[in-house]
Amino acid sequence: MLRLFTAIAVPPEIGEGLLRRQHGIDGARWRPQEAFHITLKFIGDVQEPVAAELDEALAAIEAPAFDLELAGVGHFGEGVEIHAVWAGAGESRDLRGLAKANERAAREVGLKPEARLYTPHVTLAYLKRPAVPEVGAWIQANSLLQSPPFRVESFGLYSSWLGGEGSVYRLEREYALG
């Protein structure tokens, strides 16, 4: 069984700027730079034959390369149930189109559709029962986050493995855009 997702990797020069924002919330499990990505489609646990079919469907996606930037920050959850803080992806028709193409590819191989609203983001930290005022202060201090634009020329199929410090991601296959 493989735990999979598709995503766009965040370039190191953009990731460096995100690392500088990783402070100010006690107990936060800040993500390492190599884990920074923008998820296109969370696949979940699948058998290897399904993963092989998905690989073929993803390889057939035709989409243009595009420029993207990160803009703003946010969180998932409310009150003491806030469980993550993130940097948002700037609004992009091309990004949304690529995410929809990934969703279609997953459906083609029999995977269930995503029920949640797509919120493109880079997870910066996972939280467990945080001090809400600290999260609020962090959001306020970082709300004007704006990265330089970066070129997206590919996306990847990643596997997720649970390690001692949280999930570790491995690029299984890369798909060119453009």
Image: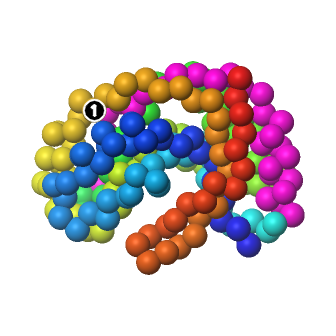
Q: Which residue is drawn at 30% across and 68% down?
A: 128
The x and y percentages for residue 105 are 78, 42
Q: Residue at x 23, y 68 (%)?
A: 27
The count of marks equals 1
Work out whether 47 lies above or below 85: below
Under mark 1, the amino acid is Leu
The x and y percentages for residue 17 are 30, 39
- Res 81 seen here: no
Relative to 150, is 142 on the left or the right?
left
153 or 74, nearer to the observer: 153
Relative to 164, is 147 on the left or the right?
left
Give the magenta part as a residue range: 49-78
Work out whether 31 lies above or below 161: above
The x and y percentages for residue 117 are 53, 41
Residue 140 is a magenta residue = no
Relative to 151, is 128 on the left or the right?
left
Residue 64 is a magenta residue = yes
State which quarter of the image contains the C terminus: top right
Q: Name the residue under label 1.
A: 145
Under circle 1, the secondary element is loop
The x and y percentages for residue 162 are 53, 73
Residue 84: image quadrant is: bottom left
Q: Residue at x 24, y 58 (%)?
A: 79
- Res 15 seen here: yes
State which quarter of the image contains the N terminus: bottom right
Residue 71: image quadrant is: top left
Q: Residue at x 53, y 43 (%)?
A: 9
Label 1: how many residues lie within 10 Å, few (<14), some (14-19) or many (20+)?
some
Q: Which residue lies furthest to the front in this view?
A: 13
